[in-house]
Image (cartoon, rainbow, N blue to C red):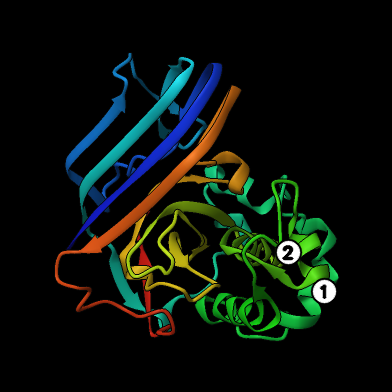
Amino acid sequence: MKTIYVGCQLKYYVHTPTSFLLNISAAMNDFQRICNERIEVTPDQPLEQCQVGPLGNRLFRLIGQPGPLSIGYQAEVELRSAAVDSNNVGESNYSSLPPEVLIFLNPSRYCESDKLNRFAMNEFGWLLPGYSRVTAICNWTFDHLTYTPGSTGPSTTACDVLLQRAGVCRDYAHVAISLCRAMGIPARYVAGYAVHLQPPDFHGFFEAFLDGRWFLFDATRMAPVGGFVRIGTGRDAADVAFATLVGAAESVEMSVWANDSDSFGGGPGPDDVRSGLSSA
């Protein structure tokens, strides 16, 4: 078990009454326990907690009135990820996949896996099925893309990123997810906090379904997967945007943090693929 302290501070200037849907709270599941949690809105106003989507992502909703608006969130989270020897993790047969997993084989808004079948088979079809093949997909993504802040926008898809060969964390995740799905491996997007991420920000990584469970991967290699705190899970980033606004408001300032209670003394690092971590 590992304790991670996470949080964010979001500041906006609201021009007209604006609806905010905030996806910033740590998820609750068997592998991730929230010990303490606090959210503050200034000026004080009603805050609704709701669950959205088939995976029950936990969101906050509020109506921001004209003027400055500040939202602060912090939590102490205990991680209970299950580590296994990655050499023993194979791929699940299609016929044995749970029904709820099948949706993560389909193309989605940002992950056009149906356009990448031939490419994926040529690059990865000859590799040994299992954890090592997903690792190879992550390695390919890391080697062939350049991490470039500001190079992509809200409409950029995995195929766009493959053409321009540049992106940010969500783009790396979308490319890897698309290639996994093209190979018949269920994959889904995870938004969260990440220990040792520089610069600190909300982070996008992904999971692949192997041998009957979900395993965490990060194609950017910017943070150890053992320090990921899940916020939300979806088909791609469209399902787990950290803030959705309807109205007129502009972001003034944002800070995000994730700190380990023991300076992250254990767990696999960004380049360590000997252990697979399952957290869902």
x, y percentage for residue 89? 45, 76
Number of residue marks = 2
- Under circle 1, the secondary element is helix
As shown in the figure, which amino acid type bears the numbered disc 1? Answer: Phe
Q: What's the CA distance linking mark 2 and mark 1?
A: 9 Å
Instruction: Say which residue appears at 50% left-offset and 76% top-offset.
Output: 131
Task: Name the amino acid type tagged 2.
Answer: Ala
Q: Contact (CB < 8 A) between labels 2 and 1? A: yes
Question: With respect to residue 122, does 30 lie above or below?
Answer: above
Q: Quadrant of the N terminus?
A: bottom left
Q: Against 159, is 137 above or below?
A: below
Give the numbered dot on residue 141. Answer: none
Name the residue located 51 percent from the left edge and 23 percent from the top edge.
Answer: 14
Q: Is residue 267 left or right of residue 107?
A: left
Q: Please name the residue that numbered disc 2 is placed on.
A: 182
Q: Nearer the viewer, residue 152 or 84?
A: 152
The picture places residue 276, in percent across and down from the top left corner, at 39, 74
Q: In the rendering, at what x and y percent does residue 135 appear? A: 54, 79
**Residue at the spot 25% in from the left edge and 43% down from the top edge:** 74
* Residue matched to label 1: 119
* Mark 2 residue element: helix
Q: Position of residue 209 (x, y in %)?
A: 51, 61
Q: 10 Å neighbourhood of mark 2: few (<14), some, or many (≥20)?
A: many
First-in-chain label (2 vs 1):
1
Relative placement, left or right, of 124 versus 67 is: right
Left or right side of 84 for 238: right
